[in-house]
Image (cartoon, rainbow, N blue to C red):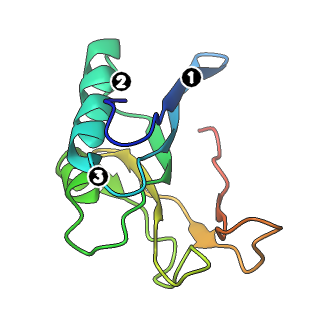
Amino acid sequence: LPFAQQRRVAVAALVHDGDRRIGAVSTHFDTTRGHRKMAEAIWQTMAILGWKDRVVVAGDFNSALMLDGGVREMKEHFSELACGTGPTHALGSRLDHIFIGAGDEPFACRTGLQRHRSDHHPLIAILRAR
């Protein structure tokens, strides 16, 4: 991801199950800045890879503000799953999100109740091959 204040990454993998495949990206955006450019880097990289559908992008987007540029940019290219509305971070903000391809069928997810020694509540989803 583009450097802002701290070095942050996105890791991508193409998961195969026979003839079926899904592109999966796990990311962790910078704490306070550069979110829009980081989101642009994700969707541009996925476009280069040819990943248009059957994709999941999830992680800590550090999106403490409702008008966060990174989340807004992601919503222009992906659909956000409804994993709850409460905070995902111990300080009371919803920082974590799951996005799918704009044409993909939404699936159930939720925000976990336990933080398991983390400062974040996990987002929990089960992907089913079709």
| Side (left or right) of 4 relative to 107 | left
In this rendering, the answer to whether 129 lies above or below 90 is above
In the displayed structure, does residue 58 sit left or right of residue 115?
left
Locate residue 34 relative to residue 113 in the image: left or right.
Answer: left
Q: CA distance from mark 3 to mark 1?
A: 26 Å
Residue under the point 44% across and 35% down = 54
The disc, 2 or 3, on the residue closer to the chain's N-terminal end is 3
- Residue 90 coordinates in the image, percent (x, y): 62, 79
For label 2, count other residues whose C-alpha is less than 10 Å away and answer few (under 14), some (14-19) or many (20+).
some
Q: Looking at the picture, does residue 94 appear above or below residue 30?
A: below
As shown in the figure, which amino acid type bears the numbered disc 3? Arg
Image quadrant occupied by the N terminus: top left
| Residues marked 2 and 3 touching at CB (< 8 Å) | no
Residue with the most extreme right position:
116
Q: Is residue 14 above or below residue 1?
A: above
Residue that mark 2 sits on: 51
Residue, disc 1: 13
Image height check: is 77 above or below 64? above
Q: Which-is-in-front pick, marks 2 and 3?
A: 3
The answer to which quarter of the image holds residue 120 is bottom right
Q: Nearer the viewer, residue 65 or 45?
A: 65
Front position in the image: 35 or 17? 35
Look at 50% across and 79% down and name the residue there.
84
Mark 3, residue position = 33
Observer-side mark, 3 or 1, equals 3
Query: Residue 25 location in percent, x, y?
Result: 50, 34
Taking the spot 31% from the left edge, 21% from the top edge, the residue there is 45
